[in-house]
Amino acid sequence: MKIMVISDLHYDKRIFHGIDESKAWRWLLDIVDYHKPSLLISLGDWGEAINEVEFYELLRRVRVWSIYGNHENLEVLRKMYNILTDKYEPVLLDNGEVREFDGLRFGGINGIVALRRRERKGVLRKRPKEFIAVAKRLSGKIDILLLHDSPWLEEYAGKIACDERVTAVGIAIYEAKPKMVFCGHLHLSPYTVHRFEYGTLYIRIDTSQKHRCYAIFYPNSMEIEIWYDTKISKILEAKEMICITSSS
C-alpha cells in the first residue's frame, strides 16, 4: 500500500503571481491516476474553488483524509464522505481524532495558529494554547502527526519570523512526540526534511502549482519519496532516521 500526502493545492479560479491556480484540480486527478495510491492525505488549503461535483471525481478514485488549513471551502469539505470504504467515513478529520491505516496511527490538528483573528472567511484559527492543548491530547496515541501549520527552523531564518505562532507549532510537535510529522503552509521551497533532536522526522511539502511537490509514503517499508509532478526528487529511508512501531 502507498499513501500520497499533499498540502496547499490552492485550487482557485485566478492567476496568482503569474501562476494559473485553476489548473490545480485537473493536475491532482492526473497525479492520483498516475500513482494510484490507497489513501490520499491532504494537510489543508485545498483552495476555495473546490466543489462537490469535482470532489466526488476524486473520491471515486481514492480514499481521502484531510485536515483544514486557512484557505478552504469548509462548506464543501464538511459534506464530503468517502465512497470507497465500507463505513461512513468523513473526509475531514476532527481536532485530535486518531485514525489507523496499515498499522499506523494518524492524528491531526486543524487550522493555523493566530494571535488576533479568530477566523477568516469562515475558517477557524487557534490561539497558541489551544493548538498545543490538542497536541497534548494526542501524546502517546499516534505515530504520524498531520499539521497544516509549520514550526520555525533555522533554515527559515530571515524568511519567516520566529514568533509566538511558529513557536507554538514547534511546542505542539514536541508535546505530541510523533515518529513523523507532515506539515505545509509555507511556500518557501518545494519541500523541507528535518529531524528534531528528540527524534521526530519533519517533512514539509508545497503542492501548489508553484512547486507541484508531494510525498509518496509506503507504511510497510517506511520509505518516503518526494516527487515533483511525475519525477522523483528524493528518497528517504525513514527506518534509518526514526524507529516506527506498528500500533498494538
Image (cartoon, grey):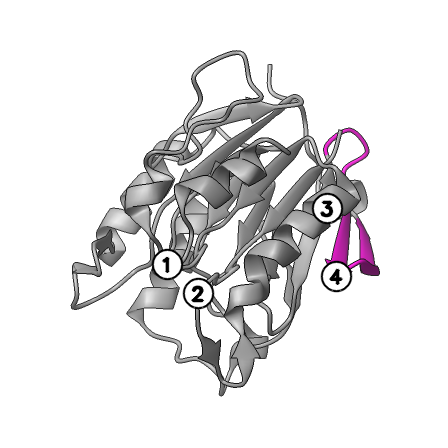
Q: Residues within 10 Å of mark 3 (few under 14, many from 20)?
A: many
| 1 or 4: tag closer to the N-terminus | 1
Main SS, magenta region, reads strand
| 2 or 1: tag closer to the N-terminus | 2
Would you say 200 lies left or right of 110 here? right
| 4 or 3: tag closer to the N-terminus | 3
Query: Residues under labels 3 and 2: Cα distance?
Result: 24 Å
Query: Residues under labels 4 and 3: Cα distance?
Result: 12 Å
Secondary element under disc 2, as helix, strand or loop, is loop
Would you say 166 lies left or right of 219 here? left
Q: Amino acid at mark 3?
A: Ile
The residue drawn where x is 51% and y is 82% is 157
Q: Amino acid at mark 1?
A: Glu
Mark 1 or 4: the one toward you: 1
Q: Which residue is mark 4?
A: 229
Q: Which residue is mark 3?
A: 216
Query: Residues under labels 2 and 4: Cα distance?
Result: 19 Å
| 3 or 2: tag closer to the N-terminus | 2
Residue 88 in the image, given as x and y percentages of width and height? 43, 17
Query: Residues under labels 1 and 4: Cα distance?
Result: 22 Å
Q: Which residue is mark 1?
A: 48
Residue 122 in the image, given as x and y percentages of width and height? 20, 54
Q: Amino acid at mark 4?
A: Asp
Quadrant assignment, res 240 = top right
Q: Residues within 10 Å of mark 4 (few under 14, many from 20)?
A: some
Q: Which residue is mark 2?
A: 12
The residue drawn where x is 72% and y is 42% is 217
Q: Residues within 10 Å of mark 2 (few under 14, many from 20)?
A: some
The N terminus, quarter of image: top right
Q: Label 1 near label 2: C-beta < 8 Å?
A: yes
* Up/down of 155 relative to 131, above or below: below
What's the magenta region? 219-236
